[in-house]
Image: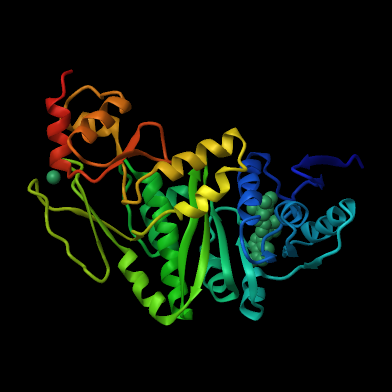
Amino acid sequence: MLLKKVREGRAEIILEDNVFYNPRMKFCRDMDILIFSNLQSRDYLDALSATGIRGLRAKIESDYEVIFNDKNWKAYNLIKENLKLNGIEAEVLRVDASSLMRQRFFGHVDIDPFGSPAEFIDSACLSAQRYLSITATDTAALCGSAKISGLRKYSACAVKIDCYPEIGLRMLIGKIAREITKYDKGVEVLISWAKEHYYRVHLRIRKSVSFAGKLYRKIGYLFYCTECGRKKWSSMLDAETGSCKCGAFTIMGPLWLGELDNKQFTASLIKKADEEKFNLLQSILDELDTPFHYDIHLISRIVRVSPPKIDRLSEIIREKGYSFSRTRFSGTSFKTDAEMEEIIDMLKSYPQ
Ligand SMILES: C[S@@+](CC[C@H](N)C(=O)[O-])C[C@H]1O[C@@H](n2cnc3c(N)ncnc32)[C@H](O)[C@@H]1O
Ligand SMILES: [Zn+2]
């Protein structure tokens, strides 16, 4: 049999039919290596390993102590082959990831599934002691394209609007945050992003009953006016609704309303990043912490003006004394602390 070998980062792996490996996720794994090298725990569960590539790279490039796991026999045997190929010894398990995480604690748990991580979130929240990293590729369920799937998997409701990638990320983090508080733990987002077909979040865990309770200040609902595009939000503890002058709001949530990254942590990564990672990290660093971005095209359509260049819009909004930033989500999106009515006025009054 002809073995197919690939090199990724400083690891080399053998590939096999029916064992998952997606070369397009290399960027995500490259980001992870940069991130892992800045974390304080080396005890890491690669709960859904497939070929073992993520854990192997964590071991070789970030000096992690890795426990590999995959319930599939072929994957389990391949992980062992791949460890041997790289001259590495490590614990390899072939069990159901949820059962494992209900039985053992790990400093850092990583969940990188096909599609939705929903079935693993509860046990991962129990098992992870310091860090939790999660990927989701069921973007339609998270961002409001598949509303019922979103309800079934994340117990949250969304419809697809202009800032849908941000809603997806916030629905995922919101679900994790709501699951973890019952274990007297809370989370802080170290870094998160949306790219192509996936979301990735890296969370730091804080064990504290009071921190866990206060997390609900950062979880809540988005109120969206389909007429004028206005967005308001309110935490579960405040539970204010209000209405837009156009009529009733569409309600979405529960969603994470807190920060999508820790700026200090992100800044510490950027120094070692190559160009592609630098661009993402810079856009994360620049982005305002305020939730929910606007899309310049959608807003211009609502206001019935031709869309200004984003740099021009930035000048107009800043001249009026408001904050403005681009976002990590797309080249045509922006965030501001200006109210929707003011954004509309500014768009209407700038010279076309
Ligand atoms: C998307 S792949 C993992 C990809 C890998 N982390 C990477 O970076 O290439 C998901 C893997 O999870 C395994 N898996 C699915 N459900 C599982 C479960 N309940 N327990 C353990 N492994 C599981 C599958 O066999 C598959 O190999
Ligand atoms: Zn309105």
What colour scheme does the image use?
A: rainbow
Classify 39 as above or below 284.
below
Picture quarter containing residue 329? top left
Classify 262 as above or below 68.
above
**Looking at the image, which residue is at 22% across and 34% down?**
317
Residue 175 falls left or right of residue 307: right
Of the pair 263 and 218, the residue shown nearer to us: 263
**Looking at the image, which residue is at 48% across and 39% down?**
282
Residue 141 falls left or right of residue 230: right
Residue 233 falls left or right of residue 325: left
Q: Position of residue 341 (x, y in %)?
A: 13, 41
Of the pair 279 and 319, the residue shown nearer to us: 319
Looking at this rendering, what residue extends furthest in the left direction?
Answer: 245
Looking at this rendering, what residue extends furthest in the top direction?
Answer: 352
Of the pair 57 and 152, the residue shown nearer to us: 57
Q: Where is residue 345 in the image (x, y as percent from the top left)?
A: 12, 33
